[in-house]
Each structure stands twice: as C-alpha cells, then as structure tokens.
Amino acid sequence: MWIEETYGDLKDNGFDLERSALCHFLRLSRLTLAVALLYVWFLAFGADLVQQGLRSEVDRTDRRDLSLFRIAWDWLQRALLFDLPFSISFVPFFGSLPDFHPCGW
C-alpha cells in the first residue's frame, strides 16, 4: 500500500524523474538521492501541517484525500502564490516509536 503512494508521489503527483532523460548512472543516482531527501522533507512538512491543523486549507475537511506529500506540495505552492510565511525546518514527527533494543536488553 505505501509503495504505491510513494511511487505515485515520485512519478505522477510531484516529481517526474523520467523527464530528466538522464542516462549517466552517477548523475541519475545523484538526482534520485536529492529527490529522496526532498521527499522525506515534504513528508515531515506535511506531518507538521497536519499537526498544526492547516490540512483543511488544501484538502477536504470531511475526509483525507491527499497524501502527506501532496498536502505539503499543495500548501507550499499556495504559500508561494499568496506570499504566506512558512518555515523551512527538518523536525520529523513520526509518532511515538516503541523502545527498540537490538540486543534485547
């Protein structure tokens, strides 16, 4: 389920890596790394927008149709269009993760 959303975000809903038409392996791998880092930032930014209650400005209020990536993408486009202030930071929120001890202690 999650890989389909990721593929859709990277292919149709946001970034279109095929358009670059890069054939050189190192250039394509650098572009892929940059897009992956930007994708993670968009996910963190989308999660922050949902926490702040700003999701309703770009998504439906009765249900959630957009992924976190699309919420952040659309909100960023809206903020740039209307000259709204926003902060660029990387403080991801992934919920409370269980304590993981690899050695079993």
Image: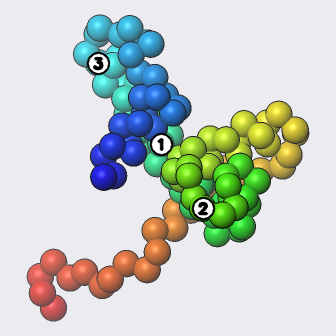
Quadrant assignment, res 51? bottom right
Which of pointers 3 and 1 lies earlier in the amino acid sequence?
3
The quarter of the image holding the C terminus is bottom left
Position of residue 101 measured from the top left corner of the image (x, y, whole percent): 20, 82
Name the residue tied to disc 1. Answer: 39
In the image, residue 50 sits, relative to residue 35, either above or below, namely: below
Position of residue 37 measured from the top left corner of the image (x, y, whole percent): 45, 42
In the image, residue 32 sits, relative to residue 70, either above or below, namely: above
Position of residue 24 measured from the top left corner of the image (x, y, whole percent): 28, 10
The amino acid sitting under disc 1 is: Tyr
Distance, label 2 to label 3, CA atoms, is 42 Å
Judge whether residue 41 can be spotted in this image: no
Quadrant assignment, res 60? bottom right
Name the residue tied to disc 3. Answer: 26
Label number found at residue 63: 2
The amino acid sitting under disc 2 is: Arg
